[in-house]
Amino acid sequence: MMSCLRATERMSQSLDQKLPLTERVQLKLHLLMCKRCERCQQQMELLHRVCRKRSDQSADN
Amino acid sequence: MAEVLLDIAERLEALRPRLLAFARLQLVDESLAEDRVQDALLAAYEARENFSGGSKFETWVFAILKNKIIDEIRRRQRELTTQFDADQVVEVDAMFDERAHWVSGKQPEHWVQPESSYLNEQFWQVFDVCVFHLPEGTARVFTMRELLGVETKEICDSLGLSQQNVWVMLHRARLKIRGCLERGWFGREALPK
């Protein structure tokens, strides 16, 4: 099974480009079994959205 | 007509503090940030007739500033290359054990009301501090990617970095900021409000 460190690398990368199918499946399997990484993924995605907001918000205030 | 021009100049001037705060976040160097904001204000003033009114005026000025900042980062690529060392983000090494699993106490915790945080000005102060605390090179790559919305391929080209290098830096930056936001904001359940 993929390690947590590896899983966090993949989830980070998936925010920048589409992962190859095998890696997507491996990551998905890991996330199904690992609560900590599942949480990490949600939070990285939130961070990604927060950054968008930061840019837009600077312009929208 | 004179009134309209005055109006634009005043609106631009009123935007200056927020433009500056944004530029500082990307460029770190205070005087460079001021210079690029000045450039952007002038450019916006000169191009005022191009403002279509289709987007918000503020959004339009910020887009001009973003381009000035990206140009600035590109200009400085050579002097910065040596500083692109993701290993400086040492906190990440402490997050995982020898089997590359989460170290107990460093794992992601439940976040309190993550989606409504945008509305809180204090949240953004915490956010800015977390980004500021990244090593300079990593901060540069992170802000280019996440705050300026530049694709990784383009970051590689402008900064002369390999794709792998950029991914490593983004990965470490995200993990560090995640932890920083958790300590400074989302894990605040235990703290007095």
Image: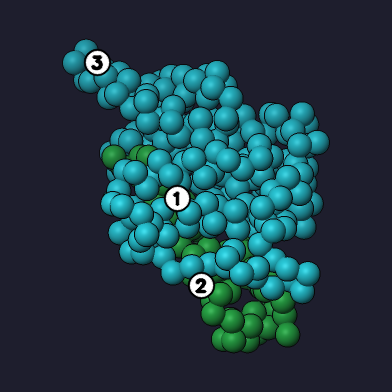
B136 or B40: which is nearer to us? Answer: B136
Q: Which residue is mark 3?
A: B6
Closer to the camera: disc 2 or disc 3? 2
Q: Secondary structure at mark 2?
A: helix
Q: Which residue is mark 2?
A: A39
Is tag 3's residue or tag 1's residue first in the polypeptide sequence? 3
Give amino acid for label 3. Answer: Leu
Q: Residues within 10 Å of mark 3 (few under 14, many from 20)?
A: few
Q: CA distance from mark 2 to mark 3?
A: 51 Å
Q: CA distance from mark 1 to mark 2?
A: 17 Å
Q: Which residue is mark 1?
A: B184
Residue farthest along the top direction in this orientation: B2
On what subunit does the disc labeled 1 rest?
B
Pointers 2 and 3 in contact (C-beta within 8 Å): no
In the image, the chain rendered in green is: A
- Residue B40, image x and y in percent? 46, 25
B113 or B55: which is nearer to us? Answer: B113
Residue visible at 58% across and 40% down?
A: B133
Residue visible at 48% across and 68% down?
A: B109
Image height check: is B172 above or below B6? Answer: below
Left/right of residue A3 with respect to residue B112 in the rendered view:
right
- Residue A16, image x and y in percent? 61, 61
Q: Quadrant of the C terminus of chain A?
A: top left
User: Chain B appears what colour?
Assistant: cyan
- Residue B75, image x and y in percent? 69, 29
Residue visible at 23% across and 20% down?
A: B7
Q: Residues within 10 Å of mark 2 (few under 14, many from 20)?
A: some
Q: How many marks?
A: 3
B88 or A15: which is nearer to us? Answer: B88
Closer to the camera: disc 3 or disc 1? 1
Give amino acid for label 1. Answer: Gly
Left/right of residue B18 with respect to residue A6 in the rendered view:
left
